[in-house]
Image (cartoon, helix red, strand yellow):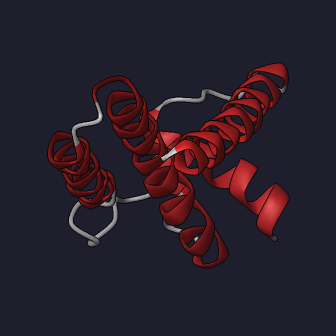
Amino acid sequence: MEKVQLYSGLYLSVFLIVHVGAVMFGRQIQLDTNFYFAAAGMNLSPAIFVFIPYYFLAVTAITLHVASLHYLKTKSKMVSYGIAIIGIIAAALIILGYTNSFEWREMPVEYQHFIKMFFG
C-alpha cells in the first residue's frame, strides 16, 4: 500500500502540472478552456487514445491514493479495497458521461480553428 500511495501521488502531481499547464496555455492564447473544448478535443482520432486514459488514470489515482492512506491509518483491507473499487467504477462512469456514452459530442464551430492549427 505504501507503493500504491507513492505511485498514485506521483501520477497526480504530474497530472496536475500538465493539466494546469494546458489550461494556462489555452488562456494565454485567449482560448476558452471549458467543458465543450475538452469534449471537442476528445472527438479527434489521436486525442481519443490520450485523453480517455489520462482522465481515467487521474480519477483512479485519487481514489487509490485515498484508499492507501485509509489502509495505512486503519489497517482495514476490506474498506480500503472498497474505496479503490468504488473509485475505479466512478472513473469509468465519469469517462462514460464525459464521452456521452462513447457517442461523442458535436464539435463546437468556434473550436474548429484551434483544432486545425494543432492537428492539421
Classify residue 102 by image quadrant.
bottom left
Q: Residue 101: horizontal and vertical position, in percent?
A: 21, 66
Q: Residue 120: horizontal and vertical position, in percent?
A: 81, 71
Q: In screen coordinates, is 26 left or right of 43?
A: right
Q: Please state the total of marks drawn on the protein image.
A: 0
Q: Residue 84: horizontal and vertical position, in percent?
A: 28, 49
Q: In screen coordinates, is 19 left or right of 85?
A: right
Query: Which residue is painted at 66% across and 40% down in the image?
Result: 15
Residue 104 seen anywhere in this rendered image of the structure? yes
Query: Which residue is painted at 70% across and 57% down in the image?
Result: 115
Residue 108 seen anywhere in this rendered image of the structure? no
Q: Residue 73: horizontal and vertical position, in percent?
A: 36, 23
Query: Which residue is painted at 75% across and 35% down in the image?
Result: 22
Classify residue 12 by image quadrant.
top right
Q: In screen coordinates, is 19 left or right of 28?
A: left
From this viewpoint, which residue is outermost toward the front? Answer: 75
Image: 51 above or below 60: below
In this view of the protein, which residue sits in the foreground, 45 or 58?
58
